[in-house]
Image (cartoon, rainbow, N blue to C red):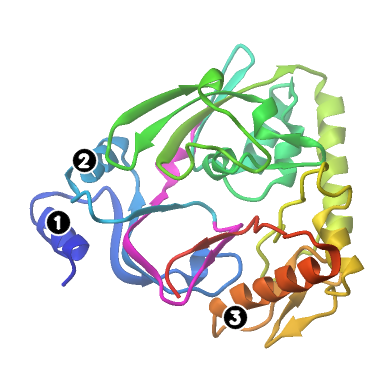
């Protein structure tokens, strides 16, 4: 057995797992793309204290990986070595104090948006258009329709990968487009967002408009991963990723059941269930062709995890 499996076999002998612990667990169902390798150890966490204890005790050389709702991850066929952590339902509580909304890291973004509608808190409507949970949204500074987490972020709590408690304020973070510098080493267990007093009817209408616009411009009911590539910096190109893909005649390319959605050519449609590596190969082909036609290297927005 591996060092990480040995650790958890011993840990289970003297500790009750608050959540779920699985060995060599397929991760295909944890990615919206519907394919992917196995996790050496998968831990669905329901206790902050136990997570802290495990991260502190786990040998430092054992790799740690955090996943959320799986809306923007591609898990390679070789799987993920070490420990894969997913926060459970105990991390889905929402509280309101004045105009600050505090939500557990596993709370769905759209649930927060609807909660704010009910409480007449404005400024967070765009969360209804972001798939996934708030911990994942903070990890990548997610956004849509002209807004992102940077604009509403107030504070966060969590653990680093070795079990040290972390409290984060806005001044601690240097957000960039789809980038949070702490994401590669932090589990965001609680996130606080700042809204403003608003009119419930106006908030409801904005959420409805976002959902209508999203349904008109983005695919539904398919195996996809959201936006595949980041939009380039406007100083590099005024064109968005999908426009560069279209301009480079890449929108009709397909590879073994992997193609772009006919509704939006920055959204992959995966019609096969054999290989995650095939999706990565498709993305590399698109990057190569777009660069050859435009001189612009598209960066992945979907996060690629694991080993080939």
Earlier-in-chain disc, 3 versus 1: 1
Q: In this rendered view, identify the residue nearer to me: 235 or 181.
A: 235
Question: Which label sits on residue 67?
Answer: none
Using residue 17 as the reference point, say whether residue 121 is left or right of it: right
Q: From the top left corner, tell me how far across and down residue 140 is, in percent.
A: 59, 43
How busy is the neighbourhood of tag 3: few (under 14 within 10 Å), some, or many (20 plus)? some
Residue 113, picture quadrant: top right
Q: How far apart are marks 1 and 2 (CA)?
A: 16 Å
Q: Is residue 119 above or below residue 127?
A: above
Q: How crowded is mark 2: few (under 14 residues within 10 Å), some or many (20 or more)?
A: some
For image coordinates 34% across by 48% down, the residue present is 45
User: Could you say whether the residue bearing mark 2 is in a helix, strand or loop?
Assistant: helix
Residue 85 counted in the magenta span: yes
Name the foreground residue: 19 vs 187: 187
Tell me whether the residue at label 1 lies in contact with that at label 2, contact meaning CB atoms closer than 8 angstroms: no
Q: Where is residue 99 in the image (x, y as percent from the top left)?
A: 64, 15
Element type at mark 3: helix
Q: Residue at x 46, y 24 (%)?
A: 168
| Furthest residue toward top | 98
The mark nearer the N terminus, 1 or 2, is: 1
Of circles 3 and 1, which is in front?
A: 3
The magenta span reads 70-94
Q: From the image, tell me which residue sits under label 2.
A: 56
Could you tell me which residue is drawn at 41 percent across and 76 percent down? Answer: 78
Instruction: Answer whether residue 42 is magenta in the image.
Output: no
Q: Is residue 264 visible in this depiction of the protein?
A: no
Q: Where is residue 283 in the image (x, y as percent from the top left)?
A: 67, 71
- In the image, taking residue 267 as reference, residue 303 lies left or right, namely left
Which quarter of the figure is the C terminus placed in? bottom left
Q: Mark 1 points at which residue?
A: 12
What is the number of callouts on the image? Answer: 3
Residue to which mark 3 is pinned: 278
């Amino acid at each position: 057995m591996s060092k990480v499996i040995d650790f958890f076999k011993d840990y289970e002998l003297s500790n009750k797992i608050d959540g779920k612990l699985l060995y060599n667990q397929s991760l295909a169902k944890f990615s919206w793309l519907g394919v992917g390798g196995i996790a050496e150890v998968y831990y669905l966490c329901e206790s902050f204290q136990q997570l802290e204890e495990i991260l502190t005790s786990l040998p430092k050389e054992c790799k740690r990986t955090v996943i959320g709702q799986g809306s923007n991850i591609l898990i390679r066929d070789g799987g993920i070595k070490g420990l894969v952590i997913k926060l459970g339902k105990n991390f889905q509580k929402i509280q309101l104090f004045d105009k600050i909304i505090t939500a557990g890291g596993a709370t769905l973004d759209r649930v927060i948006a609807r909660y704010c509608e009910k409480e007449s808190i404005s400024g967070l409507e765009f969360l209804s258009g972001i798939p996934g949970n708030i911990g994942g949204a903070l990890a990548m500074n997610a956004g849509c329709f002209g807004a992102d987490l940077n604009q509403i972020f107030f504070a966060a709590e969590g653990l680093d990968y070795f079990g040290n408690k972390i409290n984060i304020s806005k001044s601690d973070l240097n957000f960039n487009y789809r980038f949070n510098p702490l994401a590669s080493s932090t589990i965001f267990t609680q996130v606080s967002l700042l809204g403003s007093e608003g009119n419930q009817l106006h908030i409801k209408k904005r959420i409805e408009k976002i959902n209508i616009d999203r349904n008109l411009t983005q695919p539904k009911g398919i195996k996809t991963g959201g936006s595949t590539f980041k939009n380039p910096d406007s100083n590099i190109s005024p064109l968005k990723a999908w426009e560069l893909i279209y301009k480079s005649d890449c929108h009709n390319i397909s590879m073994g059941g992997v193609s772009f959605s006919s509704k939006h050519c920055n959204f992959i449609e995966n019609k096969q269930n054999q290989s995650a590596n095939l999706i990565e190969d498709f993305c590399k082909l698109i990057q190569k062709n777009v660069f050859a036609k435009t001189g612009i290297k598209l960066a992945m927005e979907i996060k690629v995890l694991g080993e080939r």
